[in-house]
Image (cartoon, rainbow, N blue to C red):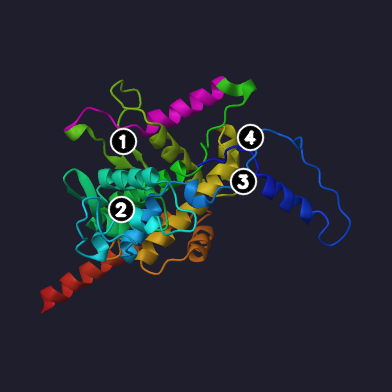
Amino acid sequence: AALEDVWVSRASAKQRRGRAGRVGPGLAVHLFPSDAPGMAEHTLPEVKRVALEQLVLRIKCLKLLGGSHSGPSGTAHESPKDGRASDVCEQLPEPPETEAVEAATEELALMGALVIKRRSGHAIGERLSALGSALARLPVDARLGKLLLFGVLFGAVDEALTIAAALASRSPFLSPLDARDKADASKRAFARDAAPSNKGAGGRGEESGGGLAGDPSDPGRLPSDLLAVHRAYFEFDCLGGGDAGCSFARDRLLSIKTLQQMASLKRQLLEALSGAGLGVANGQVPPGLRQSYLESLGRRSGGGDGCRQALEHWSTRQQQGQQQGQQQGQQQ
C-alpha cells in the first residue's frame, strides 16, 4: 500500500483555503496555478476510486437486495442472498461503474469467495461460499484475509501475519545511493537464509527459529522477497524494539519505521482474527485479544510485537489442557 500523487480537486483546495482563516487572519499558499490543468471540480467519491471486493462481500453478507429483482433475462432471483451486488450498488447516491462491480465479483469468484449463478451466459446472482463468509468477517482486503485464513489452517498464524503486514506496508529494505551494494548483499542474505530448498521431501524445508532449515549455500534454495522480509522482521522482532533492534536495523539497512509499522499492523490483524472468532475453534488463535494487550505483552517479553508470544502462550495452554484431560481419562 502506498500513497499516490494525484491532483487535488478545486473544491478541496477551496476548503483548505477556508481553514487558513477559521479562528483568525491567515494566509493559504497553494503550489499550483489557479488555472492548473487536470483539476476536477469535486473529488470522486471513494466508492469510485477504490477496489470493490470488500464492498461486495459486505453486500452479500448483509443479504441486501437491489431495486431490480431480476437478472438480464427477466428471471426473478430466488432469495436476497442470491441477488446481484451490482443491483445494490446502483441504488447508491453516486454508484460505481457497473463494470467495476462485475470485475470485483469475478475476482472474488476466482478467489473462491463467491459462487456466481449464471443463466444463458449471464450472471443472475451471487452467493457467498464458506471462504467468502469468513472473509466478510475480517475488516481487511480480501486477498490479505485469505492469506490469514490459510495461515490459520496450516498452523502458521504468526508467519501469515508478518507477510500480510509486509504486503500492506512499504518494503523495509533501504537502498541508499552510497551503500547500494551493501543493501543488496544484506537483502540477498536474508533471502538466502529464509529460502526453502527445492530438494528433499515435497520440496519443503523444516522450520527452525522463524526460518527454514537447510544449507544456506545450497544452490537449490529458492529465494523469495516475502520470505526475505519475514526473516528480516523475525530477527528484528527477536531483538526487541530497543537499542539492540535499532542497531541491527541500521547495520542491515532496514527501515526502523517500516518495521514498527509492520508490528502495529500485525497486532491489528491478529485482533481482527480473534474478534471474528477465526482460528479460535481449532485452537490456533486466542479469543478476545486486543492490540493494547499484545503491545503490553510484547514489552514484557523483551520488546517484540507480542503476537508470537500470545500465540505461543495460547498453544502451550492448549497442550497443557489436552495433557491434563488425557491424564484424567487414564485415571478414570
Measured along the vertical axis of the image, is residue 137 above or below residue 118?
Answer: below
> Residue 45, image x and y in percent?
54, 51
What span is colored magenta in the figure? 181-201
Instruction: State the separation of the CA atoms marked 2 and 1.
Output: 25 Å
Distance between the alpha carbons at the discs numbered 1 and 3:
28 Å
Q: Is residue 191 magenta?
A: yes
Front residue (pair 277, 263): 277
Q: Amino acid at mark 4?
A: Gly
In the rendered structure, does residue 134 fall within the stretch colored magenta? no
Res 148 label: none
Q: Upstream in the sequence, badge 2 or badge 1?
A: 2
Residue type for callout 1: Ala
Q: Dot 1 surroundings within 10 Å: few (below 14), some, or many (20 or more)? A: some
Q: Secondary structure at mark 1?
A: loop
Amino acid, disc 2: Leu
Which residue is painted at 48% across and 28% down in the image?
A: 187
Q: Earlier in the sequence, mark 2 or mark 3?
A: 2
Residue placed under numbered mark 4 in the picture = 38
Q: Nearer the viewer, mark 4 or mark 1?
A: 4
CA distance separating discs 2 and 4: 42 Å
The answer to whether any part of residue 120 appears in the image is: yes
Q: Earlier in the sequence, mark 4 or mark 1?
A: 4
Is label 1 in contact with label 3 (beta carbons under 8 Å)? no
Q: Is residue 157 above or below residue 199?
A: below
Of tags 4 and 3, the one toward the viewer is 4
Q: Local crowd at mark 3 within 10 Å, few (<14), some, or many (≥20)?
A: few
CA separation in Å, label 4 and label 1: 54 Å
Disc 2/disc 3 C-alpha distance (Å): 34 Å
Mark 3, residue position: 243
